[in-house]
Structures are given as structure tokens and as C-alpha cells.
Image (cartoon, coloured by chain):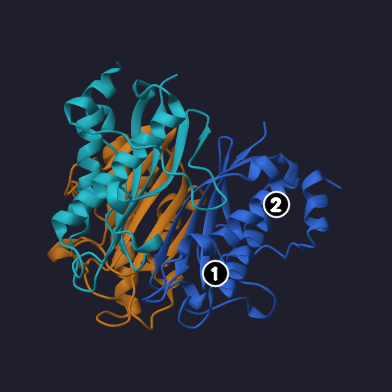
Chain colours: A blue, B orange, C cyan
């Protein structure tokens, strides 16, 4: 078992089947030593986490939604690379929160994904990111996150 | 005529004059073998397609708006590269839909752009993407899409 | 003094201490010859500029907010590179405006950041960009901008 997969097991994270794109695109593209992963929504067992953050769902639920996005990102990394130990660095996350009118604690939501990356990949999981509150997300999912990942040679 | 231009002719797509930036930036930057294209709005003949999706305009209109963004992206590729056959891969699209309060079918909108990329570039047009519903877009355009493109050596 | 720092002095721009991430991520990641900088908000002296653009604050204030984001981006470049003359090209800016319901002049806002890049870095500051109006931003800041920067070898 790879180091990263051992860490996932220790964290009790089971990677789902990678989410198939719901449109005419692909879940990831490799260019040079960079892996670009399509935006992953907060889909999970039982349908995942939907709703407007701060109105229909609370911060803690939204953080779990962001963590689901992270799990789905890692599932795509696994599909793309075979071996998760080939992740040299999580370079950048783009975090989108479906925010309600009075909800400004967007960084705390995306931490649900950021924290997972650091838990799983250690120093290699420390990334740059942008986090914004959008108005609506695909199929009412609460959070979407995309990623750029650097691959080991 | 290049293969890609022949395909555009077959699809009856006429590339417009590339849209000049409406501010102090440039339409694209090449770094290494990657072309970064500025966000292209749904500008077209007669002014293009504006309005809030799901409130002022419907899904089909919004899909045509996304296709316009795609045409404008290809016009910028042509300006940047001269020969569209130099596109090795459309790596990533960032799709932004000006969404109304009850509109969640954001992937279907951005398909208007994604489908065009695959129609025009074939396998090289299959890209990673993120698609989100933002609140307002420049000058009330319905859709904006930016892109990262890999160039052939 | 480096050329770029001399220019900053001429423009009377004082770089602040780089903003520490308010979450479990890092302010920038270098991969290859590219520097990815996390989204910088309109934080500044006295707390910076917050509010919904077009509702609570006007265009001119929002432009100053975008300029603050630019100053914070340059502060991160300085922290990452030591010498700002190592900036070969500002490749891409992602501009996010916290827009009110009737506010569509998003490009004019982000110009506050774009103009600064060109003032400070000259031709090397001319970048591709996307600019969108999001619904809510972290801690109610008016503007957030992230960046990709190419480094001199």
C-alpha cells in the first residue's frame, strides 16, 4: 500500500468511484507535469450535501461538503495517476461556496477541503487557493472545488 | 486550409474579429507551451446574449451564449497562434453563468462551450473544467468562459 | 534598489506585510517557473475595503479595493521571490467582485488591480484575466484577486 493510501486508511477515508463528468468534458487533463482536475462537487453517499450555506445548511455541514469535494478530488488523482504517491504537490485549489446573503465565512468552509489535503499529503498537500461565495452551483451542491496538482517526475 | 479551419467551415462557424479587452489587460498570454486566454463573454452579432439565466433568458438561450464564448475563445486562439492546428489540447475551461435564484443547471449551460470545443478540435478539445453560477457578469452578459490551452511544440 | 521597487516608491506604494492565510493553506506555491498566488482580498490599513459593490460602496471605492488586492499580490511576490525584478510576466489574474444586484461594471473594478500591475511591471505586467461578480466574499471584502506569475530563469 502506498504511503498516501495508508494515510487515507488511517483517516478512515474510502475513495468513492470517481465522479463521471455530467457533461461533455473530462475529469482531468495532464499537461507537462501538471494535472488539472475538473471542479468536484459535494457529491457523496446518499446524494451528498446540497443547499445554500448560511441559509439552508450551517457552517459545519458546509465544511463536510468541502471535505467531500476533497475526497472526490483525491479519487480523480487516483484515477489519473494510479499511485497517489506520485502527487508531488497540490499547487492550487479553487473553492466555490454556494453562499447565502449573510454568509461571509467562506474560508472556514473551504478549510474542509484544505485540511483534508494536508492530512492526506502532508507538506505536499499545502496549496495556494482562492475561495469565493458564488450564487448557485450545479444541481444545488453546496460546494465545488477544482485543483491543479504537480506530479512527481 | 488547416484541419481545424475546415472543421469550423463545416460547422458553419465564422470566427469574429477577436474581442478587444475592455480594460487594461491583454486577451491572452503565452507562458511555456501554455496559452492563457482571458475570460470571453457571450458577445456576438447584434450585441450577443445578455440577461440572468433562468429568470430573463432560458436554458437554450444560455447554451447559445456559452457557444458564443467558445467561438470568441477560438478567435483568440487564432489570433495568438495564427494556425489553429497548433492547438495540442484544450486543457481547462472556467465557466461562469449569470444564474438566477432558481437556476442550478449550470453544467448544461457550459456544455454549449464544451461541445463546441469537441466538435472543432476532436479529442484535443476534451478538457477539464469548472462551472459555477455567479451573481453578475460584465455588462450583463449571460456567460463568461476563460481557458488554458496547450500548444504543439 | 530593484527597478520594480523604485517604481513602487515612485508610485508611493508601500508594500504591507504579506497577508497570512486565514486558513490551512499557503500564500503561494512555485511549480516550475510559475508562481501561483492565493486569492488576495482588499485588506489594507484600517481594515481595508468591505461591502457590496453598487449597493454599499461605489465604483471608485471598489477600484481602490481592487488596487489593494494588487498591492497584496505584489507583497506576496516579494515574499516569494525576494527580488521583484524576478517577475518575468504577470500571466493571469482572476478577479472576483462582491457585486450588488444592479452592478455590472465588473471590468472597471478589476482595472484597479490591472492598472497597478502595468504601472509597476510595465509590459511584464500585461496579463490575461477573468473578471466576474460573485455573491459573497470572505469576511465581506469587496474584491478578491488571485494570480499566476511567470518567473525569470
* Residue under disc 2 on the same chain as residue under disc 1: yes
Residue A119's disc is: 2
Disc 2 to disc 1: CB gap under 8 Å: no
Residue holding disc 1: A22
Q: Position of residue B141 (x, y in %)?
A: 23, 66
Q: Position of residue B34 (x, y in %)?
A: 43, 36
For marks 2 and 1 on the same chain, the one whose residue lies earlier in the sequence: 1
Cα–Cα gap, marks 2 and 1: 29 Å
Q: Where is residue C43 in the image (x, y as percent from the top left)?
A: 33, 50
Residue at horizontal 46%, vertical 32%?
Answer: C34
Q: Is residue B61 left or right of residue A65?
A: left
Label 1 crowd (10 A; few <14 / some 14-19 / many >=20): few
Q: Where is residue C114 in the image (x, y as percent from the top left)?
A: 24, 42
Residues B3 and A41: in front is A41
Depicted B62 relative to depicted A131: above or below: below
Q: Quadrant of residue A87?
A: top right
Q: In this view, does A3 lie to the left or right of C46?
A: right
Which tag is nearer the camera, tag 2 or tag 1?
Answer: 2
Chain where mark 1 sits: A
Residues A105 and C136: in front is A105
Residue at horizontal 22%, vertical 34%?
Answer: C118
Amino acid at each position: 500500500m502506498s504511503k498516501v493510501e495508508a494515510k487515507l486508511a488511517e483517516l478512515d477515508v474510502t475513495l468513492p468511484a470517481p465522479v463521471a463528468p455530467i457533461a461533455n468534458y473530462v475529469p482531468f487533463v495532464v499537461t507537462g507535469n501538471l494535472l488539472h482536475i475538473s471542479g468536484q462537487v459535494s457529491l457523496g453517499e446518499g446524494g451528498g450535501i446540497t443547499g445554500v450555506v448560511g441559509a439552508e445548511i450551517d457552517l459545519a455541514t458546509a465544511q463536510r461538503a468541502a471535505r467531500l469535494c476533497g475526497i472526490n478530488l483525491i479519487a480523480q488523482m487516483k484515477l489519473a495517476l494510479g499511485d497517489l504517491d506520485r502527487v508531488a504537490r497540490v499547487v492550487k485549489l479553487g473553492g466555490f461556496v454556494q453562499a447565502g446573503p449573510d454568509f461571509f465565512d467562506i474560508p472556514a468552509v473551504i478549510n474542509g477541503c484544505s485540511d483534508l489535503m494536508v492530512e492526506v499529503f502532508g507538506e505536499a498537500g499545502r496549496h495556494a487557493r482562492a475561495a469565493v461565495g458564488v450564487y448557485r452551483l450545479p444541481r444545488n451542491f453546496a460546494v465545488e472545488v477544482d485543483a491543479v496538482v504537480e506530479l512527481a517526475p
